[in-house]
Amino acid sequence: MIRFCKNNIIKLCLASVFLLALSLTSHGQQNRNLTRANAIMDSVYKYYAVPNSPLLREQYPYNENYVADYLGGGENSTRSNPYSYLWPYSGALSAQVAIFESSNDHEIKKEIDNIVLKGLDAYYDKRTPPGYASYVNSAPQSDRFYDDNIWLGIDYTDLYLLTKEKKYLNKAIEIWKFVASGMDEKLGGGIYWCEQRKESKNTCSNAPAIVMVAKLYEATKDKTYLDLAEELYIWTKENLQDTTDYLYFDNIALNGNVEKTKYPYNSGQMIQAGALLFKLTHQKQYLIDAQNVAKSSYDYFFYDYNVASTGKTIKLLKTSNNWFIAVMMRGFVELYELDANRLYVDGFQSNLDFAWDNMRERNGLFNSDWSGEKKKNRKSLLDQFALAEMYGKISKL
């Protein structure tokens, strides 16, 4: 009997040592991810900074003839500009909010208030309803994109949920009023992509809108937001989902034609939307939807890659806009926090560990090819913020 007790004490001790080691390993990984996220932000402000300004360049090395290729036509598409457009710049807020959420570091909060938000002021546009324009307000008037504003609205709402400072919620509500002006009954509902070119209703303006109003419901308990989230969810699912694999197409034009390209962020936002709506309503179908989209996204946006140096095969992310990938990861993280299935978040961790050694160059900036095989001389600002956000967000798990 004494021997039995002794053996069990040994087993308990060994179990305790194992759990402690596991905890320390997890904590070490968390710290490593946060350290990496902050290092990327340091590199951004070293290489993309505009002297005596909170604004940033869009490319490094800086190219005064650079013209953005993502504006979908319009007058802005032919201009070269000294500052980043709003979309890449807004990645600074997403990255810093992710780092702040994981670290609760109030120095990061100061950087958000004193640098990032001051920079965003340069894009604020007072047309009715007020919102954020695609380029700085000191330049000729530029288009306003609903999705650009939604990404900011999500970040402001997250800041409120983290801090309970009303100024952030007030800004999020103001942004939502602008976004809501982009809704009408054509195609049965939904939100347009661009205020000046109401030609299509895109997943990138509807899926994150669901996320934003779901979070606004969390923040305010105003059921109007929850009802709208559910309405937009149904509309997006009915109009933009590929029913053969659960993934989401890019947009539907007013003539009913569907542009069927599948981008990581579109499906990723519907994962997050489903997860949030399940958390808020406890309706199981939302969780099932999120899990179905997550599985298909993992199958579609990752592939088997043989690592030459080790001979091992890993599930590597397909090369895409890295910010699209970061937004997809938001969905996987939201889902993990509900169902505790580590498959997808562990897949991201493996990719981020691999990226640190293979995508990153000596100056601390990242290429866009996840295999590390293809390198570019010029580095995108948004790519850097995307990686910082991913390291920051995964560090809380």
Image (tube, rainbow, N blue to C red):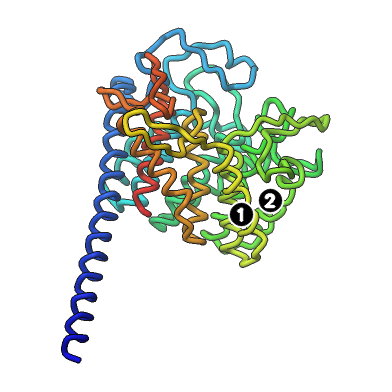
Would you call the spot at circle 2 few (<14 residues within 10 Å), some (14-19), or many (20 or more)? Answer: many
Asked whether 284 or 51 is in front, the reply is 284
Q: Amino acid at mark 1?
A: Gly
Could you tell me which secondary element the residue under label 2 belongs to? Answer: helix
Can you identify the residue that label 2 sits on? 233
The Cα–Cα distance between marks 1 and 2, rounded to whole angstroms, is: 8 Å
Residue 107 locus on image (x, y percent): 26, 45
Would you call the spot at circle 1 few (<14 residues within 10 Å), some (14-19), or many (20 or more)? Answer: many
Could you tell me which secondary element the residue under label 1 belongs to? Answer: helix
Q: Which mark is residue 150?
A: none
> What residue lies at 60% left-to-right and 51% top-to-bottom?
273
Q: Residue furthest right?
A: 255
> What residue lies at 81% left-to-right and 44% top-to-bottom?
188
* 187 versus 24 height, above or below: above
Residue 121 locus on image (x, y percent): 44, 33
- 217 left or right of 44 in image: right
> What residue lies at 40% left-to-right and 41% top-to-bottom?
390
Asked whether 295 or 361 is in front, the reply is 295
Mark nearest the camera among 1 and 2 is 1
Q: Quadrant of the N terminus?
A: bottom left
Q: Amino acid at mark 2?
A: Tyr
Would you say residue 176 is visible in this rendering?
no
Residue 379 locus on image (x, y percent): 39, 20
Q: Quadrant of the C terminus?
A: bottom left
Asked whether 101 or 368 is in front, the reply is 368
In the rendered structure, are the residues bearing label 1 and label 2 in contact, judged by CB atoms less than 8 Å apart? Answer: yes
Can you identify the residue that label 1 sits on? 274
Q: Earlier in the sequence, mark 1 or mark 2?
A: 2
Would you say residue 297 is visible in this rendering?
yes
- 354 left or right of 192 in image: left
